[in-house]
Image (cartoon, coloured by chain):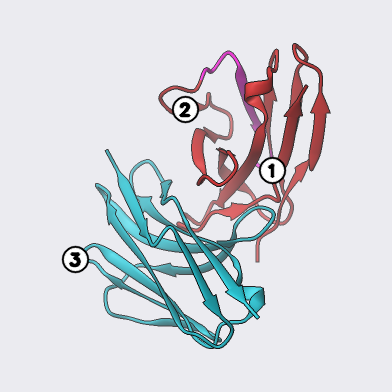
Amino acid sequence: EDKVVQSPLSLVVHEGDTVTLNCSYEVTNFRSLLWYKQEKKAPTFLFMLTSSGIEKKSGRLSSILDKKELFSILNITATQTGDSAIYLCAAFERSARQLTFGSGTQLTVLP
Amino acid sequence: GAVVSQHPSRVICKSGTSVKIECRSLDFQATTMFWYRQFPKQSLMLMATSNEGSKATYEQGVEKDKFLINHASLTLSTLTVTSAHPEDSSFYICSATGTSGYDEQFFGPGTRLTVL
């Protein structure tokens, strides 16, 4: 059975801190790993990673994938209160074209 | 980016009634649409996968007679919760992938269903 595990489940930091969110996966026919940010409504797309070792960046957010060790990390530097959200990672399974989601990391950034 | 809409955004109904939720891809053709359910403080759970013009594939534990899915066109899929009960109260989210075969799923804004 495909599985995606995120850690930590929740994290409380202060503005300006740097955080690292972890995602490990066990998916047959793995194709890609996606990160989403979910605030009050549906998830919004952050990154899609298909190749190992290539960092993707968007402003203060960055992410990288290790296909040998089957994990990905999402880094957020100089956190702001607006970064408070649930961060979801999901692994895309090639043949069924399905995403398997992790349980999410609830990030709270205090002023 | 691709836009997916859902309607209604919020619905409250009485126990025993049926509720239909629409999911539309606004600026692309969605060969595959997915329906998820999310309970408070939990992650998204895939309910079913639907391909345009064919029957939906339901995940284990999801009753296909209770959650009717129709994907009649490349831009519209509907989820009907039949004979809804309070335990069906949840956040229902659809997503869609395009014909290009990209892995990225574009999510709708979700529908909050409350069954009294």
Q: Nearer the viewer, residue B58 or B28?
A: B58
Q: Is residue B67 magenta?
A: yes
Quadrant that contains the N terminus of chain A: top left
Where residue B75 is drawn, which disc sits there?
Answer: 1
The x and y percentages for residue A13 are 52, 76
> Do residues under tags 1 and 3 come within 8 Å of each other at their CB atoms?
no
Q: Residue at image x 58%, y 38%?
A: B39
Residue B73 falls left or right of residue B13: left
Three-letter amino acid code of the residue under disc 2: Thr
What is the residue that sits farthest to the left in this orientation?
Answer: A68
Chain of the residue on which disc 3 is drawn: A
- Is label 2 in a helix, a strand or a loop? strand
Three-letter amino acid code of the residue under disc 1: Thr
Residue A15 falls left or right of residue B8: left
Q: Residues within 10 Å of mark 2 (few under 14, many from 20)?
A: some
Q: Which chain is cyan?
A: A
Chain of the residue on which disc 1 is drawn: B
Q: Which chain is red?
A: B
**Is residue B83 depicted above or below A17 in this figure?**
above
Tag 3 residue: A69
